[in-house]
C-alpha cells in the first residue's frame, strides 16, 4: 500500500509508544492547561451521582420502615396479591381446558403487577407488555376483556381510551416509545397525566428500549419505566442478556434517575413507583425502575422450564414470596387474623369461579368482522373481498 | 379534529409559479394552522427546516412544540408518534430519506398499520409519514430507494404520492386530515419542478384513493405514479411521432387503489404498460399488472408490460441513468405491445 | 467453506418417519458438523433448543460458541451476524417468529442484501436467516405473519421455503452452503407433519432456484409454496371429482424464481391459479401472476387468478380459518377459470 | 367499571399514602431484615464506579504529561493532522468542481480521525461512518478508492478484507453491530484482532448503538467504540439528542468502561484509544470512548450551517484547534522549527495536488456492471434484464 496517503506510506503507525500506559486515574492530568479556555460542552451536563441506583434493592418489608407502613394500603395490597395469584392459577387452568390459547403467568411477580396498577391515578395510562394481564386487571379492567387476546377471539378486548390502558404489547419493548409519546402529548395538552410502561429484563436489550428512554429524558416526558427483572427471557438468563451492574444502571446513560427495588416487596415497589409517578407528574421527568423478582412458573403454559433451570433455583425465591412477605408483615403488626385471611381467600375463589364461568361461554364471532376497522371505512378492495367471503359463508349454509 | 379548512383563511391567492417543495411546505403550514392537534416531528425539521427545506419556517411560525427536532432514531420517532396519536394528536413524521425509514418498519408494520384493527376501531392512527423517495438526484447509496412496495403490502396503511405541484398540496392536506395512517411518498427529484399554482383552487384537496387521467389517449394506457409521471407524459408526446395516442394514468394513491379509473382506461385502450422506478420483482407494478389482467383479461390485446428499475440495489450516481425507466424504455415497451395482432 | 458434505458421514440411514422439525434439526446438525465456520445464533436457540425445538441438542453437541443464545435484539443478532460473515464465518440466524424479524429489516435491506454488491464481490454475506412463518397454529397476533413479499422485493436476497420433510433438510443445507444470503422461511404449521425420509437420499440437497411439479396434471396449474402446498395437493385430489386434472407446482425457491418450470406448466395447461397465505395486495402472487401473464399470454385461456389471505392484519386464532386459503377457496378459483371458453 | 377484578371494585386505589415519601436515601432501609436470605441477583453484578468516565475530558496537551510525550509520535501525528486538514479542504473543493457528489468534512476533528487510524495494528479492523474518510485514508487506504462512494462511481472503492476497513457506513450506527460481530468472530477463531467502530453523537440515539454495545459487553468482544461528539447531528445540537451527563456515561448501562477525552488533543485521543485497544486485545472487553470535538465546517458541502448556529459559536473551538494545540506543544519542546513545518505543509500540498490530478480523471464505467455482484452468479432474472440493457446500449450506439 505504498500510496499517497495521510499515513505517509504505511497502514501501521511507524512508532507506537511501547510502554502500556498506566491506569487512567494515575495518568489523568490537571483540568486546564496554561492559558486554556475549555470549549463548551467540556463538563458533564449533569452530575451522574444522583442518577445512580440504590446499591442494593430498596425494601420496606423486613426493615424498620415496615412498622410505619399504612395498614389500609397493606391490607389492600395483600388482598390484590392473593387475588392475583389466584388469577394466574385460574388462567393457566383455562389453557388446559382449551379456553385460552396461551397464558404467560406472573406468579411470583404479583407485587410488581399490583403495585404498577395502584400507583396510578385514574387519568394516568398504563402500557403493559404481553405478560402484564394482572396489572391491567388490577387496574380494574374487565378480566374477560383483558383475556380476549389470549383467548383468541380478537387482538384486544378493552377500549384503551376508556380504560387508559394500551393494548397488551407482544413485540417486546415496542410499547415504550408509545408511552413516551402519549406522556409527551399529555403534557403538550396541559394535562398532568403520567404514563407507566412495563417491560421485561429481556426487553431492555431491544433498540426500542433505548430510543424510548432517550426520547423520554430529552423531552422530560412524564413517564415511568418499570423493568420487571424476573431473571429470564424465556430460557435466557440475565447474565446472557446484560453485563451491566444492574438494569437500573442503564438510567445513567439517559440522564434519568435509576431505582432498584425488591420486586417481591409490594410496599417497596408501591413506594418507589408512587414516588416516580409523582416526580413525573411534577415535571421532574422520567425514572427507570428495576424490580428484582422471579418468574416462578414457566414462560407460558407451553414452555418447559426444566430444560433451562433447576427446580432448586426456585427455592430462595419461594422463600422470598411476595404474598408471604406481606402476610408476615401484617401478622407481625397484628393487622390480620386467620378469619380475615380466609375471607380474602374466599373472595379470590369467588373471583376465579366467576372468571371460569364467564370464560366457559363461547364467544360469538362474526367472520365478516375480519374486514372491520382495517381502515375507518372499507376500501373498494376490502368490499370486494368481504363480498367473496359473504358468498362463501352463504354457500356453506345452503 | 382534522378539519381541512383553516379557521382564518388568508385572502384567496392567485395562481403563480411554485415548486412542489413550496406546495408541500404550504400544505404543512396550512394543516398546522387549521388544526391544533397537528404536530410535525423528525430529524432536522425544526431549526433547519429539513434537509430538503420542506418544513422551512414552520418551527418559527408554530414553535418547537408543534414542530420538533427529535433525537436521531427513526423507530423512536414513529413510536412516539403512535403514543401521541393515542392521546388525540395528529403527528406528521418526516423520514429524512427513504432508506432511513427502514429502522421504523417494525413500529410501522406491527403498530401503526394494525392499531385501529387490533382495538376494534377505538384507537385510530391519524399519522402521516412523509418520505422523500426515489432517485435521479445523484444521491449516494441509501439516498435513492423506492420503498413503496413494502408499504403497499402492509394492510392498514394508505400509500399516497403526488406528481404535480397542485397534488402535492392537496394530497398532503388530505393525508394529514385522514383518520388512517398515510405513507406520503414525495418524489424528491420533482421537489424543484415549478408550475402555476394557488393553494386556493377549488379542486385543491382531492380525495385519497382517486387516480387521474393526466393525458387522454386511445392506443394504450401508461399506468404510473410519482416521479415516473413526467417520464410517461414525455413518452406519450414522443409516441405521437409513431402514430400512438397514449393515455397516461397518474395513480396518486397506490392504496386505496383506484381500480375503476385504471380498468376503465385499459378496457378502452386494450393495452397497458406499468411504469415505476423501484425494482420490479414483487414491486408495485406486479400488483397493477396482475389486477389489470384479472379484471380486464378479455379486453387485453397484449400482456400488460412493466417498465421498472432493475432487480438490483439502487446504483451509484454515475450509473443511475441506466437503471431509471426513461422515455426510450417506455417507448420500447409500448412497441412490444403486439401491435401486429 | 460451505461444502455440503460432512467429512465423517455416518453410515447411510434408512428411510423412516420424520417430522419437518426433525429434518431441519438434522440439517443444522449436519451443517455444523460439516463446516466449522457455521454458527447458529438467536434467541433461545441454545439451552432451550428454540421455542419450536428446531435447534434441540445443537448447543450440547457443538458448544455455546457454535450455537449461541444471544441477547434479545433482532437487529443486533443480524447485525453481529453481518460482522461474523465479514470475518469468514457462516452464520445461521433464527428469528423466533415472522413478525419478530421486522426489527432487523434495516440490517437486512441496507446491509445483508447489499454488501456483496456494494463491495464489488469482495464481501459476500453467506448468512441464512431462518424464520418460522405463516398461520394455522392458533397463534395470537404477531405470531402468524407471512412476510415473504418484503424479502422478495429486496434485491440481493434469496428466499426459500420448503413444503416437504425431504426439502426441509435439503433446502436448508443448500441455503447454509450458499454464498449469498438466504431468507429461509419455515412453514410452522408443517413442522410436525411426518413423512418417510432419510437424510442420505441421493436427491437430498436440491439446488436453490428450482421448482418442482408435485403433481402432474393437464387442466390447470396451481402455483404455490410452503404451507399452501398440501392445501393445493388436497384441492387437486378433490378436483378429480369435477373432472379437473390439476397440476401442482411447488416453487421451493421464490428467489431465484424458476420461470422455466412454471411457464412450461402453464403453457401446457393454459390456466393457472396462484395460492398463498400472505395477504394478496402487492404480495408474492402478484409477481407470479404478472410474470406468468407476461410470458405465457398467448397460451392463457383465462386470467391467472390468485387465492391469498385477505388484505387485513392477520386475524386472531378463532377467525384465522376464514382468512387462510383452504381447499374450497382454491376450487372456487379453479371454477372461475372460464371453462366455458 | 364495577366488575369482578383484582382491584376490588375500583380502577383507582382506594387509599394512596397521602404523604410524599422522603428522599430515597433517607428512607433506605438496612440491607437484610430479620431472618431474610437475599435471593440471587440481589447485588449489582459489578461495581459501577470503575465504569464511570473521567469527570472532565482526559487531556495530555496543556498538562504536565505533554512534556513526557514521545517526540516521534508527536511529529507523526502532527504531520497527519496537517495532511488531514488539507485533505478535507481539497475534497470540499472537489465537490465544487463536480468531482465529488458530496463531502462530509472532518475539519476540526482531525485528531480523532488520525488517532483512530493509528491506534490500530495491521490485523485490526476499522468500522468508519460515512464521515470518516480521513480515518480510512490515514490508515493507508488509497484516497481515490476511499472517495469512490462520494464520487459516485460505485458504493465502495476499496477491498474491505484486504484493507481491514469496512465500507463507509451511511445508515447511522448500523456499522456498530458489524464491528461487534467481526471482533467476536476473530476471538472465536483464536485471532487477537480488535475492531474499532466510529459513530457520531447523533448516532448514539439509534437502537443499533444500544444493541451493539450490549452484545459487545455480554460477549466481552474485543471492540472499541469511539463516539466523535462534534456537537451536532446535522442541525440538531447535543442537548436535543441526549440528557445524559455525557455520552461516555452510556457505558455504565452496558457494564463497560466509559472514557471521556478531549477530541482535539491528538495525544490524548491516541492514548485513550491505544489503551482501549490493548485492553480489548488482552481479553478485557469493550470500551466506549467519547471524544469531545467540534465540526468546524458545515455538515456537508450541501449544508448551510448558518441556519442553526452562530459564527461566534465556533470561536472557542478555533482557539482549541487540534493542529494548533499540537504545534504549540512541539514548539514548546523545541521539537520543530519553521523549516520543518513548511516541509510538512509542502508534503500536504503535494498530496492534495496528486489527489486533484487523480480525481480529475473520469472514471471508466461499464453500465453492464450494474448486474454484477448482486448475487455470486446472475439469476435468470438478472440475465434477462442484463440482456435488455445490452440491447438498449447497442441500439443507442447504432
Ligand atoms: C421483538 C420480539 N422478539 C421476540 C419475541 C418473542 N418473545 C416473546 S417473550 C420473549 C422473552 C421476553 O423476556 P422478558 O423481556 O424478560 O419478559 P418476560 O417474558 O420475562 O416477562 C421473547 C423472546 C417478541 N415477543 N418480540
Ligand atoms: C439511519 C439514518 N438516519 C438518518 C440519516 C441521515 N443523516 C445523515 S448524517 C446525519 C446526522 C449524523 O449526526 P452524527 O451521528 O452526530 O454524525 P456527524 O454527522 O456529526 O458526524 C443524519 C441524520 C442516516 N444517514 N441514517
Ligand atoms: Mg424476563
Ligand atoms: Mg455529530
Image (cartoon, coloured by chain):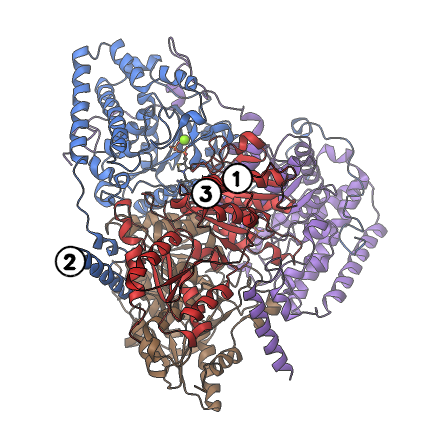
Chain colours: A purple, B red, C brown, D blue
Separation of disc 1 and disc 2 at Cα?
Answer: 50 Å
Q: Which residue is mark 3?
A: B196
D160 displayed left or right of C182: left
Q: Position of residue D392 (x, y in %)?
A: 22, 59
Alpha-carbon neighbours of circle 1 within 10 Å: few (<14), some, or many (≥20)? Answer: few
Residue C101, percent from left and from top: 46, 55
Q: At which x and y percent is residue C136?
A: 53, 70
Q: Quadrant of ligand 4?
A: top left
Asked whether B221 or A20 is in front, the reply is: B221
Chain letter for the residue marked with disc 1 in the picture: B
The verdict on label 1 being within 8 Å of ligand 2 is no
Judge whether D322 appears above or below A242 on screen. Answer: above
Q: Is residue D107 above or below residue A174?
A: above
Q: Is residue D173 above or below residue C213?
A: above
Q: How many marks?
A: 3
Q: Which residue is mark 2?
A: D398
Cβ of mark 2 under 8 Å from ligand 2: the answer is: no
Cα separation, mark 3 vs mark 2, equals 41 Å
Label 2 neighbourhood size at 10 Å, few (<14), some (14-19), many (20+)?
few
Compared across the picture, whether C206 is left or right of A277 comes to: left
Q: Are marks 3 and 1 in contact (CB under 8 Å)?
A: no
At x 57%, y 67%, the residue is: C138
Question: C164 or D360, which is in the foreground?
Answer: D360
Front residue of C338/D229: it is C338
Q: Is residue A272 visible?
A: yes
Q: Disc 3 vs disc 2: Cβ atoms closer than 8 Å?
A: no
Q: Are marks 3 and 2 on the same chain?
A: no
Q: Is residue D372 left or right of residue D14?
A: left
Q: Are marks 1 and 2 in contact (CB under 8 Å)?
A: no
Residue at (59, 78) in percent of width and height: A392
Front tag of 1 and 2: 1
Amino acid at each position: 500500500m505504498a500510496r499517497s496517503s495521510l499515513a505517509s506510506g504505511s497502514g501501521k503507525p511507524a512508532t507506537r509508544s511501547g510502554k502500556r500506559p498506566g491506569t487512567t486515574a494515575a495518568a489523568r492530568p490537571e483540568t486546564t492547561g496554561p492559558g486554556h479556555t475549555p470549549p463548551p460542552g467540556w463538563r458533564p451536563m449533569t452530575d451522574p451521582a444522583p442518577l445512580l441506583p440504590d446499591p442494593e434493592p430498596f425494601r420496606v418489608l423486613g426493615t424498620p420502615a415496615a412498622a410505619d407502613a399504612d395498614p389500609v394500603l397493606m391490607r389492600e395490597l395483600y388482598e390484590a396479591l392473593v387475588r392475583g395469584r389466584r388469577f394466574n392459577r385460574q388462567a393457566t387452568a383455562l389453557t388446559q381446558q382449551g379456553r385460552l390459547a396461551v397464558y404467560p403467568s406472573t406468579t411470583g411477580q404479583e407485587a410488581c403487577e399490583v403495585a404498577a396498577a395502584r400507583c396510578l391515578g385514574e387519568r394516568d395510562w398504563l402500557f403493559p407488555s404481553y405478560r402484564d394481564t394482572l396489572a391491567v386487571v388490577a387496574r380494574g379492567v374487565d378480566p374477560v376483556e383483558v383475556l380476549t387476546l389470549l383467548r383468541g377471539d380478537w387482538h384486544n378486548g378493552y377500549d384503551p381510551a376508556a380504560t387508559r390502558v394500551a393494548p397488551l404489547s407482544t413485540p417486546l419493548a415496542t410499547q415504550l416509545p408509545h408511552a413516551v409519546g402519549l406522556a409527551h402529548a399529555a403534557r403538550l395538552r396541559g394535562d398532568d397525566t403520567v404514563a407507566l410502561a412495563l417491560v421485561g429484563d429481556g426487553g431492555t436489550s431491544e433498540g426500542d428500549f433505548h430510543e424510548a428512554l432517550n426520547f423520554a429524558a430529552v423531552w422530560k416526558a412524564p413517564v415511568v419505566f418499570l423493568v420487571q427483572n424476573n431473571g429470564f427471557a424465556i430460557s435466557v438468563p440475565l447474565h446472557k442478556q446484560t453485563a451491566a451492574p444492574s438494569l437500573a444502571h442503564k438510567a445513567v446513560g439517559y440522564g434519568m434517575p435509576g431505582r432498584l427495588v425488591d420486586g417481591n416487596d409490594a410496599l417497596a415497589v408501591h413506594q418507589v413507583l408512587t414516588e416516580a409517578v409523582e416526580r413525573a407528574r411534577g415535571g421532574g421527568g422520567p425514572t427507570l425502575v428495576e424490580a428484582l423478582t422471579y418468574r416462578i412458573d414457566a414462560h407460558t403454559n407451553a414452555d418447559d422450564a426444566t430444560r433451562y433451570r433447576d427446580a432448586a433455583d426456585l427455592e430462595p425465591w419461594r422463600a422470598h414470596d411476595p404474598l408471604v412477605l406481606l402476610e408476615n408483615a401484617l401478622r407481625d403488626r397484628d393487622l390480620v387474623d386467620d378469619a380475615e385471611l380466609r375471607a380474602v381467600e374466599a373472595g379470590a375463589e369467588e373471583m376465579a369461579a366467576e372468571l371460569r364461568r364467564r370464560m366457559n361461554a363461547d364467544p360469538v364471532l362474526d367472520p365478516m368482522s375480519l374486514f372491520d376497522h382495517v381502515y375507518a371505512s372499507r376500501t373498494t378492495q376490502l368490499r370486494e373481498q368481504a363480498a367473496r367471503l359473504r358468498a362463501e359463508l352463504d354457500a356453506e349454509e345452503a | 379534529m382534522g378539519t381541512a379548512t383553516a379557521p382564518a383563511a388568508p385572502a384567496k391567492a392567485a395562481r403563480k409559479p411554485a415548486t412542489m417543495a413550496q406546495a408541500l411546505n404550504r400544505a404543512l403550514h396550512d394543516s398546522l394552522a387549521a388544526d391544533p392537534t397537528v404536530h410535525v416531528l423528525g430529524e432536522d425539521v425544526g431549526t433547519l427546516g429539513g434537509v430538503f427545506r420542506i418544513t422551512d419556517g414552520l418551527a418559527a411560525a408554530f414553535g418547537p412544540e408543534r414542530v420538533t427536532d427529535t433525537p436521531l432514531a427513526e423507530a423512536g420517532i414513529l413510536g412516539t408518534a403512535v403514543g401521541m396519536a393515542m392521546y388525540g394528536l395528529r403527528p406528521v413524521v418526516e423520514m429524512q430519506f427513504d432508506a432511513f425509514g427502514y429502522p421504523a418498519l417494525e413500529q410501522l408494520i406491527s403498530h401503526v398499520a394494525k392499531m385501529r384493527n387490533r382495538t376494534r376501531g377505538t384507537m385510530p392512527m391519524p399519522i402521516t409519514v412523509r418520505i422523500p423517495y426515489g432517485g435521479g438526484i445523484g444521491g449516494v447509496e441509501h439516498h435513492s430507494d423506492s420503498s413503496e412496495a413494502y408499504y403497499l403490502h402492509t394492510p392498514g396503511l394508505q400509500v399516497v404520492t403526488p406528481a404535480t405541484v397542485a397534488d402535492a398540496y392537496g394530497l398532503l392536506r388530505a393525508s394529514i386530515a385522514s383518520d388512517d395512517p398515510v405513507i406520503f411518498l414525495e418524489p424528491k427529484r420533482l421537489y424543484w419542478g415549478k408550475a402555476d399554482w394557488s393553494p386556493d383552487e377549488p379542486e385543491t384537496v382531492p380525495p385519497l384513493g382517486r387516480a387521474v387521467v393526466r393525458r387522454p389517449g386511445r392506443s394504450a394506457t401508461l399506468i404510473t405514479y410519482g416521479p415516473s409521471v413526467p417520464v410517461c407524459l414525455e413518452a406519450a408526446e414522443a409516441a405521437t411521432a409513431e402514430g400512438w395516442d397514449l393515455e397516461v394514468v397518474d395513480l396518486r394513491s397506490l392504496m386505496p387503489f383506484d381500480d375503476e379509473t385504471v380498468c376503465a382506461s385499459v378496457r378502452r385502450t386494450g393495452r397497458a404498460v406499468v411504469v415505476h422506478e423501484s425494482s420490479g420483482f414483487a414491486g408495485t407494478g406486479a400488483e397493477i399488472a396482475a389486477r389489470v389482467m384479472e379484471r380486464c383479461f378479455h379486453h387485453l390485446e397484449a400482456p400488460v408490460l412493466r417498465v421498472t428499475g432493475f432487480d438490483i440495489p439502487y446504483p451509484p450516481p454515475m450509473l443511475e441513468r441506466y437503471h431509471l425507466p426513461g422515455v426510450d424504455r417506455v417507448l420500447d415497451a409500448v412497441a412490444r405491445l403486439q401491435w401486429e395482432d
